[in-house]
Image (cartoon, rainbow, N blue to C red):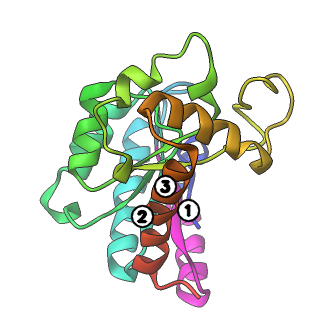
């Protein structure tokens, strides 16, 4: 459960209040997608930061991990996550698209990097950004129905395409597909255990 940054507007406080009521009443795996998005609109940047910080605090209070959306805002995201009060926040940087320095900062802060179909695109620089990141800090994802991997690009994405992403990453990391799938599964399960989700 979470307030996506592209939905943060002038009424974000009332939206957060409603979500917090649900969080307190339901069994929840994680807080997300939350984060910062400076790609579409810069009108509510301050509100996005406040909403993100509030939801990071929810994660700490409820012992949950966070699923982070970040687009064109990695500097501010890292600045917030480096605050002392958020040093114990963990989670996934969904569809990571930053550079190598940003990848290292986020992994050093304890976050996993979510890698999806973009890794299969011919013009991507994503592997250059994550090549020094250990597999222990990577998880696989789809972002379905978006970011469909090659050779299905242009069609709706599906979790059925995870093996294509896994094989591409295995090739790039020079490990077997089985090794890559095993390690990324272990990484994902650690988050489930952290939240003690039933």
Going from N to C along the chain, the mark reached first, 3 or 2, is 2
Q: State the residue in front, 104 or 164.
A: 164
Looking at the rendered image, the disc whose residue lies closer to the viewer, 3 or 2, is: 3
Q: CA distance from mark 1 to mark 2?
A: 7 Å
According to the image, label 2 marks what residue? 55
Q: Position of residue 26 (x, y in %)?
A: 62, 86
Q: Furthest-top residue in view?
A: 123
Q: Furthest-right residue in view?
A: 155
Q: CA distance from mark 3 to mark 2?
A: 26 Å
Neighbour tally class for label 2: few under 14, some 14-19, many 20 plus, Cα within 10 Å: many
Neighbour tally class for label 3: few under 14, some 14-19, many 20 plus, Cα within 10 Å: some
Q: Give residue 153's quadrant in the image.
A: top right
According to the image, label 1 marks what residue? 2
Q: CA distance from mark 3 to mark 1?
A: 24 Å
The answer to whether residue 107 is magenta is: no
Q: Furthest-front residue in view?
A: 176
| Above-or-below relation of 16 to 76 | below
According to the image, label 3 marks what residue? 184
Read off the magenta span.
Answer: 13-35
């Amino acid at each position: 459960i979470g307030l996506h940054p592209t939905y943060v507007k002038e009424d974000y406080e009332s939206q957060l209040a409603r979500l917090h009521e649900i969080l307190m009443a339901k069994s929840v795996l994680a807080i997300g997608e939350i984060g910062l998005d400076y790609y579409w609109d810069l009108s509510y940047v301050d509100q996005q930061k406040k909403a993100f910080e509030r939801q990071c605090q929810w994660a700490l209070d409820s012992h949950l991990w966070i699923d982070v959306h970040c687009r064109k805002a990695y500097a501010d995201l890292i600045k917030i996550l480096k605050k002392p009060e958020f040093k114990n926040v963990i989670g996934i940087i969904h569809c990571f698209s930053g550079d190598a320095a940003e990848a290292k900062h986020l992994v050093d802060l304890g976050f996993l990097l979510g890698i999806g179909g973009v890794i299969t695109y011919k013009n991507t620089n994503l592997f250059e950004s994550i090549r020094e990141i250990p597999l222990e800090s990577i998880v696989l994802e789809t972002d379905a129905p978006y970011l469909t991997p090659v050779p299905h690009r242009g069609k709706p994405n599906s979790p059925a395409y995870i093996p294509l992403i896994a094989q591409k990453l295995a090739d790039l990391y020079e490990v077997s597909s089985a090794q890559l799938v095993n390690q990324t599964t272990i990484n994902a399960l650690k988050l489930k255990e952290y939240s003690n989700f039933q």
